């Protein structure tokens, strides 16, 4: 069911206009600038509407609780964003701009680092030269946060969820059982993270009454979850391969093995698949192109056939040596055969791929 929904979604998106990814990548610095400006505007609006800034007739100076260090305002994050923008612009524009962008980023990061070190020296009770500072020095409780501050205990959950997301993405590429088991991995790790968060919240509520918060110390290794993920990965690989009957590949028809003669000694029936007539043929099977290299005619229009033997959607896209797209075929959900009419291309080397599964690639030679 999940695979059918995913296939229908891909078939729907195939009707949309495929963007020019090269042009979109070139617009990334502009997008970052727009997001940065929008974020600055949002910060200004939030600052102007944040809480009461006056009590009585005069402005109150904000004070942090005793024993809590609050770093002062800083322009370093904004300067760092400017440095990243110029570096991104340099990577796109090339030439001297790359060096200028890298230099600006290094200068901003050095400024940010020096500011952080000054702040750390003040918080640690030193003046930066090793001399102790009495005023504003913070207590350094061993093994516990300051009173009234809740520090979450370390957790393996983000790492486990990231691993489960990797399994799910791999399942979306392979399809079938791998996709279903990837979804199960997400559910297992997500429920584990939710359970940890629930226990932490209850412990915090208990600390509000008793005044004591037990962070629990270093977490144990999640051996059970690791074992469950390992079982899911192995099961997905086995079920997506040909190791088990009907686990992958194409099953033989119920009338007997492929190519066997019928009872009675008569001639075998003709193949149900008609012959494919095209100048070049690419076969998609097991989320891979069987042919890694093909030859195409140069200087004239030709036909290119896609024999999609998978139950997944595939198509063919041709790119020249510079990465520019010269042809993109319609997405076809298999098993099916599609013959594309391709306009003339100059002689040279080309790359063919499937836009739905970019891992399916090969080399075409036009000559």
Image (cartoon, rainbow, N blue to C red):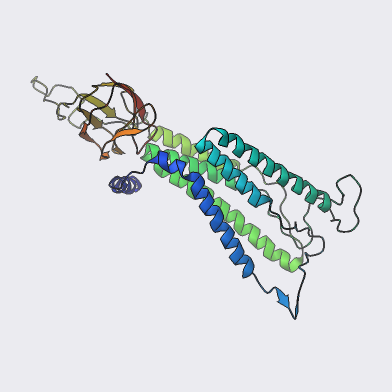
- Indicate the position of residue 14 as horizontal and vertical percent values: 29, 45
- Indicate the position of residue 46 as horizontal and vertical percent values: 60, 66
Placement of 274 over or under 138, stated as above or below: above
Q: Is 230 left or right of 6, judged from the image as shown?
A: right
Q: Is 182 left or right of 362, judged from the image as shown?
A: right
The tally of labels here is 0
Placement of 180 over or under 204, stated as above or below: above
Residue 301 appears in the rendering: yes
Q: Quadrant of the C terminus?
A: top left
Residue extending farthest to the bottom is: 56
Residue extending farthest to the front is: 96
Residue 178 appears in the rendering: no
- Indicate the position of residue 197 as horizontal and vertical percent values: 61, 56
Residue closest to the eye, 139 or 234: 139
- The quadrant in which residue 241 appears is top left
Residue closest to the eye, 197 or 220: 197
- Indicate the position of residue 286 as horizontal and vertical percent values: 33, 31
- The quadrant in which residue 342 appears is top left
Tell me what residue is drawn at x 36 percent, y 33 percent: 324
Residue closest to the eye, 315 or 94: 94
Placement of 207 over or under 331, stated as above or below: below
Residue closest to the eye, 184 or 33: 33
Tell me what residue is drawn at x 14 percent, y 29 percent: 274
């Amino acid at each position: 069911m999940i695979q059918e929904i995913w296939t229908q979604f891909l078939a729907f998106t195939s009707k949309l206009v495929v963007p020019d990814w090269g042009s979109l990548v070139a617009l990334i610095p502009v997008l970052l600038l727009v997001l940065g400006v929008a974020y600055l505007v949002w910060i200004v609006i939030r600052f102007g509407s944040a809480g009461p800034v006056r009590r009585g007739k005069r402005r109150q100076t904000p004070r942090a609780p005793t024993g809590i260090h609050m770093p002062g305002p800083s322009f370093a994050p904004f300067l760092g964003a400017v440095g990243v923008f110029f570096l991104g612009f340099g990577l796109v524009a090339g030439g001297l701009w790359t060096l200028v962008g890298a230099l600006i980023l290094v200068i901003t990061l050095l400024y940010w680092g020096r500011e952080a070190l000054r702040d750390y020296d003040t918080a640690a009770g030193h003046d930066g030269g090793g001399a102790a500072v009495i005023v504003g020095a913070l207590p350094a409780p061993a093994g516990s946060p300051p009173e009234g501050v809740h520090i979450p205990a370390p957790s393996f959950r983000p790492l486990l969820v990231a691993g489960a997301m990797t399994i799910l993405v791999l399942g979306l590429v392979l399809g079938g059982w791998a996709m279903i088991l990837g979804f199960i991995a997400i559910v297992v790790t997500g429920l584990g993270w939710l359970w940890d968060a629930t226990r932490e919240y209850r412990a915090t509520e208990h600390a509000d009454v008793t005044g004591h918060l037990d962070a629990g110390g270093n977490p144990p290794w999640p051996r059970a979850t690791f074992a469950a993920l390992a079982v899911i990965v192995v099961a997905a690989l086995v079920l997506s391969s040909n190791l088990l009957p009907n686990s992958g590949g194409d099953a033989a028809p119920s009338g007997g093995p492929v190519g066997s003669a019928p009872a009675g000694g008569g001639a075998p029936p003709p193949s149900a698949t008609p012959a494919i007539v095209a100048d070049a043929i690419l076969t998609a099977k097991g989320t891979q192109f069987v042919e890694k290299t093909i030859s195409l005619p140069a200087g004239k229009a030709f036909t290119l056939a896609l024999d999609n033997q998978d139950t997944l959607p595939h198509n063919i896209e041709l790119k020249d040596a510079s990465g520019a797209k010269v042809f993109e075929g319609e997405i076809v959900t298999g098993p099916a055969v599609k013959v594309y009419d391709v306009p003339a291309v100059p002689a040279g080397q080309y790359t063919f791929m499937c836009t739905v599964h970019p891992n399916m690639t090969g080399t075409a030679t036009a000559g």
